[in-house]
Structure formats: structure tokens, C-alpha cells
Image: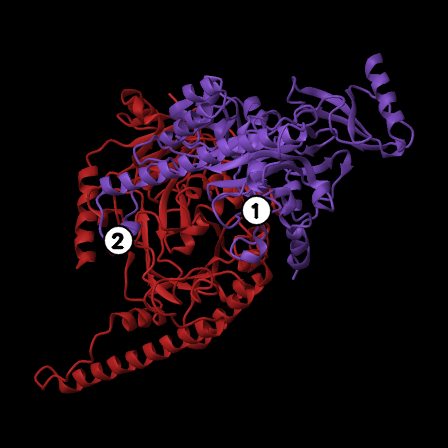
Chain colours: A purple, B red
Amino acid sequence: MKRTFAAVLALFAATAAAQDATLLRGGRVVPVSGPALARADVLIAGGKIAAIGPNLAAPAGATVIDVSGQHVYPGLIDGLTTLGLTEIGSVPGSVDVREAGDVNPHARAWLALHPHSELIPVARAAGITHALSAPAGGLVSGQSALVRLAGGTPAALVVRGPAALHVAWPSGSAGFDIAQMFAEPELKTFDERQKEKKKNQDKALARLAELLARARTYAAAHAASVAGQGPAPELDLALEALAPAARGEMPVVFRADAEDDIRGALAFASQHDLKPIIAGGLEAWRCADALKAADAAVLAPVDRLPRRESDAYDAAYTNVLALHRAGVRFAIVTDDASNSRNLPHHAAMARAFGLPAEVALRAITLAPAEIFGVAGALGSLEVGKSASLFVASGDPMDHRSAVIHVFVDGVPQSLETRHTHLYQQFKDR
Amino acid sequence: MNRLLLCAALVAAPSTLAAEPPTAIVGATILTVSPAGNIEQGTVLIQDGRIVAVGADVKVPAGARVIDGAGRFVMPGIIDAHSHTAIEDNVNECTDSVTAQVRITDVIDQQDVNIYRQLAGGVTAVNVLHGSCNAIGGQNAVLKLRWGVTDPAQLVFAEAPRGIKFALGENPKRANFSAPGPRRYPATRMGVAEVIREAFLEAKAYRREWQEHEKKVKAAGPKGVPPVAPRRDLKLETLVDILDGKVMVHAHSYRSDEIVVLIALAEELGFKVRTFQHVLEGYKVAAEIAKHGAGASTFSDWWAYKLEAHDAIPYNAAVMASKGVNVSLNSDSNELARRLYWEAAKVVRYGSVSEQEALKMITWNPAWQLGVERWVGSIEAGKQADLAVFSAHPFSPDARVELTLVDGVVRFDRAKDTAARNAAPAAGGAK
């Protein structure tokens, strides 16, 4: 208790504005990192959680909010989105998700974030305080950023950029698309199409392997030239951007759903000493052993259809349960932008199909924070961490629950959105 | 012809069921979605595919097959008023701006696994609509999810009135996609409205032609020389049936202006819009929709995927309902269809709709929208026994469908499903 008090004092000293302090009084506090506290206070000061416990004294000038009967949770983190990069899906001028060409390691999400996107307050009003904003498409899609969903400039949004390099794994499985079969100039058999797909995959992977090797060479040459041991390599921004991932210093997120593709990505990562993360991972349950062996995390949306007709109807719902049982690290994500607010509902479906409730909650808070290396500041309610949290009328996985307060780094956020404005404008018309 | 065959098939079914013992679900919380409200520790008694009794003190006859409902929640089977299930790759006949002659009933695949997957989400009936690529699309099919039948006609909800798809806005003017071949008229909302007006004026002329022909037939008498009949036109014949109130119009729509423009057109030409589908800006013109008497079938919270969805709000269902519009929540998706019970739970949060009213938006309200509320949509004696049995209240985050019955027949049983996958481990999923 004394130590907590000292910590509070230290924080106050560090931040001149003691009147910025907020005390959330008497809520049920769910820290995620530890057991829920039936009734406790949370003191926010200097943008951080200054204390958690019963009957905390409110510092002079602090705003006291009565949250009795309500629930306090760490801000939700959606570990795979295009938030800030897209506005209206069908209007190309409002979408900055996919760069031209196939190899874009130097496409950096944080250079295209639209801080005033209408989608950001909508996600935030659902308790989502942070998200991974990632480019997509091509072969090497670009670099993602872990962003806070509050702030007036791209720089203000960025918590960690780069967070990861994103690769769209070239699928080697042809699938069965009858429309595409008829669109082809010559009718091909399934085997022929499968062979062609495999050939294209081999070509793409050879290209990726070569790029990684060149990036490592480039980085070594650059380091040598800085040390005065050789000439500077000819400037190549793509290789320069690729180097940290090629050297295993930055995780590589491979987008892959099919079992073969996931296993392929893991083998490729192992062969090239990369740190793999699997995005999508619809069939991750089929290769949980390989994921565990590679220590690869999975970013998995839950509300999806099974990949194969022969799969159990709930294969996508129980996917993360299989990962949990196998000890594979995973985060539940939306892989969306406008529907990011439904993140807790993906977790709810996994829970309804057997994932323990506390694991489901962890999968949308602390787990993604750990995967992207920001768990020191985000993902749970602990003294010293960022005061990014929300207060809800009930369990956020219950669709009926309302979000009542949202704080990002200690700053209370308006819950008004484009939607509440239009609602107010028209509800009594 | 198809219809005759179909009737024969359906008439045959009850006679085989007649020998079956009754089924009773006992000890469950029954969400009747009727004036009886929720019944604790209740029993639903089923005989010959129908609900024969529901209540807290229903006597279970000797020999009845008993389903233990302890701790479980029974609700009416969910009805999805906007689906494209079981017709993969046959959604759109895009080649003309008016394709009223084509029928979804001609392309049903009774083996589509999505039928089973949706049963596992408590869905028992779906409105399979033509796509939205033309102003007047094809005729829809209301299906009951009788998974396991071998003839696609056996999926058809025989009592359901006929219906047709209309479409307004970006899709019929093809703003968001390009199809092979030359551009097709219309390319603006002006053109969409004009196509509909012209089609109905043509249909009225066609109707007059036939009326005059019938007069001539009458005048000629049975012994006179029969007059030459006008050439039969299946497209115009369908439009005439709309004018005669025999075919329900389900109109894909987004923006408020196109909604009120279609209402004005319909009132001018003399037909009714039964439902506006999607109707994401319905909240802006809810009074007009209510006045016309149309229902609204919408998404709970989808938005931002195209320009005409930019003003979509999750309060849409609540606002329209508050103005007296019959509102349903639909999926338009094989994936979303599996969790419509949670789509309904969302309107409790957005706009404070009561739980009773929210449940109605996936049961009785869509039943009314499809003209089948006399047979399904609530748990009441006399109705067809389409039921979903949940492990918890359907709105709770622990809810999972355990059993789904269509016409009293168990078409999905989670216990059996999981037992079967233990026998075939490659199927995966939780054991």
C-alpha cells in the first residue's frame, strides 16, 4: 500500500497537472493480468494507472466518477485492422490499404493514417483503444503500426511503428472456383490449375527468398560502410525497409488460411530465420503443433465460415480453442475496420464454443499487446501502465452491454460518433 | 407444373408423420414471441409437425418422445428475410434491367452445406432472393431448412406467397463493379426509376390486352371461333401479378431518397412494396415507410462498405420500429446468418429496444414480411413446429444452439454432430 502511494507521488511529481487525475470509484475491476476485484477504485494520473485498490483517496482537484455497479476493463486491442487506412470501401480515393506492385516493404501504414477517420471514434466508443493498422495485398504488403485510437496527427496515433512486416503468403492451393474456370481462355483440369498455382507459388517464394537475402547483404554492406570498412551500397529503399525483418529483428506477419499455406509459411520462416506471425489462420487448428514448435502467434478472427465443406460447422469458432489447448499464442482480431467495434463479439463466439471467458478476454487485450511487444504499457490494468481503459454496463462480450466511459492514455474520450450524431438528428423526425 | 409436383410431395409427408409419437420439450424457458411472453419451466408439445400446446402446465402424453429442456431456452426458429443460401453462382441474372421472369426456385441446391450450418445457428426459414444487379430482378424462394431432403422442391415453404426482388441505387446502376460486355442502362438513379415505371406501364398494357382477349373469348362463346390469344410474356405476366397483389416486392435500397421515390412510384403505378431490404437510411424516412405499410429488413450495424452505406447507423432498426415499421434483421450472408440471435441482441444496446421486441425482429417480424406469420414466427398452438433450442438465453455470450427443429423434425442436433465428428476425427472442431 505504501509502495503504491509512493508510486502515486512519483507519478504526480512527473506530471505537473495533478488536476488531470481521475478516480473511478467503486467499480468491478477486471485487470486481465490478475483476478477481478469485486469492488475497487482506479486512480488515473499523468496518463497512467496510478493506483488500483479499495477506498483510494482522491487527490485534490481530481475528477471523481462513480462507477459503482459498472465494470472497468483495459482498453480492447484489435490486433488486425485497416483502421485509419480506409474510409468507404468502394471509394478508392478513401482507401490506402494496398500499394501498387507486389513488393512494398517500404509502404508504411503510419504515413497514411487518417486521424480524423469517422471509423476511429466508432471503434473507440466500443471500448477499443488500440489497433494494429496494417497494409494488405501484393506479396510484401508493407509495414503495420500499433496505433492508439485517439489523436490529431498520424504521429499522435502511433504507439509502435513499425510493428511488423506483412506478407500475403502466395497460396499454393487452387481451390475450386467454377467461375474462374470458365473465365480462362482454355479449359483446364483441376490438376492443371493446381500445378499452375504451385508453380506461381514457387516463383513468388523464390523471389521473396532472394529479396530477403539481398536485404541482409544490403544491411551488412551498409553497416560496414558506416564503420568505414567499405563503400556504401547503392540506395535501395525497399531492401533497406526489408532488412530488419530479414535479420529477425521485426516480426513477419504471413497472411495464410489453408493448412498447407500455414505450414509453408512456418517452414519458410524457419529456413530464413524470420519471426513468423500468422494472420487469418482459418485452419490453424489443423497445425497447432507446428505453430507451437515455431512459437508463432496467430491473429484470428472467429466469425468466419469453415474453409472446407467437410469441416465441422463450428471449425472457425473452435479454432482458437484448439490453439489455447496446444499452448499456441493467439489474439482474436476482426481483420476489419468499420466492424472493428464487434471485436468482443468474435471473442464471445469463441467463448460460447468452449474458450474460457477469461482467455477470450485476454485474447482481445493482453495477448495482442504481448504479440506486438507493447505489454509493458498496454493490455491490462496495472499500476504504471497506460490508463487506456473503459467502463461498461456489463460484460463487453455480451452484445447488450453499453460502454459508458473510455480513456486513452488517461484522457477521457467522447463517445459521440457519426452514428450518434445521425441518430440524434433523425430519431424524432 | 413444378408447383403441382411440390404439393404432391408435401401432402405425402404428413401422412408418413401421422404415425409418429408426439414430441415434448419439457422444463425449458420458452421465449414464445407471442402475447404469452416468456414461460419458465415450460413445455412445448409437438404432433405431426405442428405445435399442439405450449405452457407451464401442459400434460405430456404417454409414449411421447421427451426432450429435456432443463436450463435451456427455446425460441421460434429464426427467419432470415434476406439470404442467397443454396443458390451459389446463381444469384444474379444481370443481362437485362428487368428479369421478372426468372425464378430462384429453378436453381436451388438442397445439398448446400450452408443450410446445415445455418440450422446450427437456429435458422429454420430463409428468403432466398435474386441479386441486386437490376432494377427489377427475379422471383425469390422462401425455403424451410429441411436439411436432408433429396428433392430441392421439398425445401420450398409451400404456404409462402410469391415474391420478387427490386433494387435501387448503386447496384442496379452498377457503380461498384463492372461486368463484361457493353454498359447497360440504367447508369443513374433517374434511369432506375424510369426502368421501373416503363416496365409497369408495359405490364398494364399487357394486362389490358389479355382482358380484351378474355372479353372476346366470352363474346365468341363456347361454339364461336376462338380469337387468337396474345403472345404470352413471362416477364410481363409476373409484373401483372405484382399489380394484382399476388407477388410481394422486396426492394433493395440504401439512401432515403430512393426509398421515398419508390414509394411514390408504387403508389402511382398501383402496387405495394412489402419490404425494403437493407434500407440503411430507413431511419431518415421511417414515417413514410410506415405510412406505405412496408416492412424494413436491415443489417444490425454494417456500414461504410460503400458510399450509400456511409450514413448507416446501428440505431436504424430501433428508430424505424419506434415509428411503427415492422423491422427484421437479416444476414445477406452465409456467415452472418449463423448468428442472427446476436444481431438481435445488438438492438437492445443500440436504441434500447426491449428484448421481446428484439427477438421479434428475427422471428415474427420477418415471418410477416414474407407473408407466413400464420404458420411460423412464434411458439403458439397450431403453428408449424420450427424451433431453436439454446444452451442459454440466445442473447447471452454463452449461448449456443443445441437443437433445431423444422416441422417438428430435429434437423440439427449438436450432441449428434459432435459424436459424429469423434467418429471422423479429420472433421476437427471441439470434441
Q: Is label 1 in a helix, a strand or a loop?
A: loop
Q: Residue B39: image x %, image y %?
A: 48, 34
Q: Identify which residue is drawn at 69% across, 44% down.
A: A154
Q: Is label 2 in a helix, a strand or a loop?
A: helix
Vertical position of residue A180 compared to residue A246: above or below: below
Q: Which residue is mark 2?
A: A182
Q: How many marks?
A: 2
The Cα–Cα distance between marks 2 and 1, rounded to whole angstroms, is: 34 Å
For residue B215, what is the image quadrant? bottom left
* Residue A166: assigned label: none
Type of the residue with mark 1: Ser
Q: Quadrant of the C terminus of chain B?
A: top left
Q: Chain for mark 2?
A: A
For residue A134, what is the image quadrant? top right
Type of the residue with mark 2: Phe
Q: Which residue is mark 1?
A: A338
Left or right of A302 in this view: B209:
left
